[in-house]
């Protein structure tokens, strides 16, 4: 039956050295995709550990591609490298992001620009270069971005982060409409509080500092990985332009 099997699909997940991105990479590899994991060059050792673990636990192909998602040259080179080494690109998960807590009155232009550069521009560059590759391949695709509950409802001390995540929703809707004729779907996930991540820890510290309620629902990164697993599947073709919440009911659209 080997010759009748369709070739393995290929996914690139950014910000995958830890947290939600790492969990998504494992889940997509378990789903049978070959995966490329990206993070900053300073995280190469963690990325290589993820690659080795994926290869030994799933038997699939996995590679590491370092690069800063806020730089267009890096994103372009990442996509070229994945296509060269794994043979194409079917699923892009633009997961990399940062969170910086700062009230509006203390927010600096540098902090604003950093949030917009990584969470906003970084996602746009990943969408753009994945779309160009997928259009050229002509076999459709799945583009998925990281939004946040803060991309649907503002949160105190997160004005730059929330603005960058609201941008992801607008970008996702426009990209979905533009790319539908190419059978490429574009969606985003909007997590609530996800623990065992760097961002989850920052959220906890900030909640304690502001005396905000601590008893909100929280979940492990695997709940986001399972949502991404579904949106990445071919059978999800009728879902596009959506930013899907996974937050234990803490915010309802
Ligand atoms: N953890 C949560 O509660 C939560 C909630 C809502 C949304 N999110 C979003 O989910 C995504 C993943 O978050 P996480 O909690 O796993 O965070 P995390 O900090 O644990 O992991 C993020 C990863 O992205 C990498 N990264 C940062 N800047 C980068 C850049 N310029 N280029 C490439 N990689 C870069 C980091 O090195 C890190 O490995 C983020 O976009 C975040 O905003 C997380």
Image (cartoon, rainbow, N blue to C red):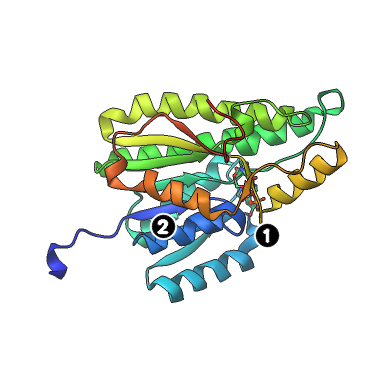
Q: Secondary structure at mark 1?
A: helix
The x and y percentages for residue 1 are 12, 69
Residue located 41% across and 56% down the image: 82
Query: What residue is shown with label 1?
Result: 42
Q: Residue furthest bottom?
A: 56
Given residues 168 and 132, the one toward you in this image is 168
Q: Is residue 18 left or right of residue 13?
A: right
Q: Is residue 95 left or right of residue 113?
A: left
**10 Å neighbourhood of mark 1: few (<14), some, or many (≥20)?**
few
Q: Residue furthest front?
A: 215
Please indicate, yes or no, whether residue 66 appears anywhere in the rendered image.
no
From the Cβ of disc 1, is ligand 1 less than 8 Å away? yes
Number of labelled discs? 2
Residue located 57% across and 71% down the image: 49
- Picture quarter containing residue 237? top left
The x and y percentages for residue 200 are 69, 48
Whether 1 is drawn above or below 242: the answer is below
Q: Secondary structure at mark 2?
A: helix
Q: Is residue 144 left or right of residue 213?
A: left
Given residues 97 and 72, the one toward you in this image is 97
Q: CA distance from mark 1 to mark 2?
A: 24 Å
The x and y percentages for residue 80 are 42, 51
Residue located 24% across and 59% down the image: 7
Looking at the image, is mark 1 or mark 2 earlier in the sequence? 2
Residue located 54% across and 44% down the image: 73
The x and y percentages for residue 120 are 59, 33
Whether 59 is drawn above or below 137: the answer is below
Given residues 1 and 78, the one toward you in this image is 1
Which mark is nearer the camera, 1 or 2? 2
Query: What residue is shown with label 2?
Result: 28
Q: Is residue 118 left or right of residue 64?
A: right
């Amino acid at each position: 039956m080997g010759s009748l099997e369709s070739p393995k699909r290929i996914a690139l997940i950014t910000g995958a050295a830890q947290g939600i991105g790492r969990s998504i990479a494992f889940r997509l590899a378990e789903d049978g995709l070959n995966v490329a994991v990206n993070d900053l060059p300073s995280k190469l050792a963690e990325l290589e550990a993820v690659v080795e673990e994926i290869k030994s636990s799933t038997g699939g192909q996995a590679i590491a591609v370092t690069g800063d998602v806020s730089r267009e040259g890096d994103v372009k080179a990442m996509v070229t490298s994945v296509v060269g080494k794994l043979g194409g690109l079917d699923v892009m998960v633009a997961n990399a992001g940062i969170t910086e807590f700062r009230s509006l009155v203390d927010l600096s232009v540098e902090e604003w620009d950093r949030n917009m550069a990584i969470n906003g521009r970084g996602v746009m560059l990943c969408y753009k270069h994945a779309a160009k590759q997928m259009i050229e391949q002509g076999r459709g695709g799945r583009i998925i971005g990281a939004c946040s509950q803060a991309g649907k409802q503002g949160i105190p001390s997160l004005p730059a982060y929330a603005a960058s995540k609201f941008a992801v929703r607008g970008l996702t809707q426009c990209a979905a409409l533009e790319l539908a004729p190419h059978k490429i779907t574009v969606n985003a996930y909007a997590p609530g509080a996800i623990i065992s991540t760097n961002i989850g820890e920052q959220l906890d510290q900030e909640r304690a500092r502001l005396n905000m309620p601590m008893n909100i629902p929280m979940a492990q990164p695997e709940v986001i990985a399972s949502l991404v697993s579904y949106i990445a599947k071919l059978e999800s073709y009728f879902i596009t332009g959506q930013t899907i919440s996974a937050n234990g009911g803490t915010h309802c659209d």
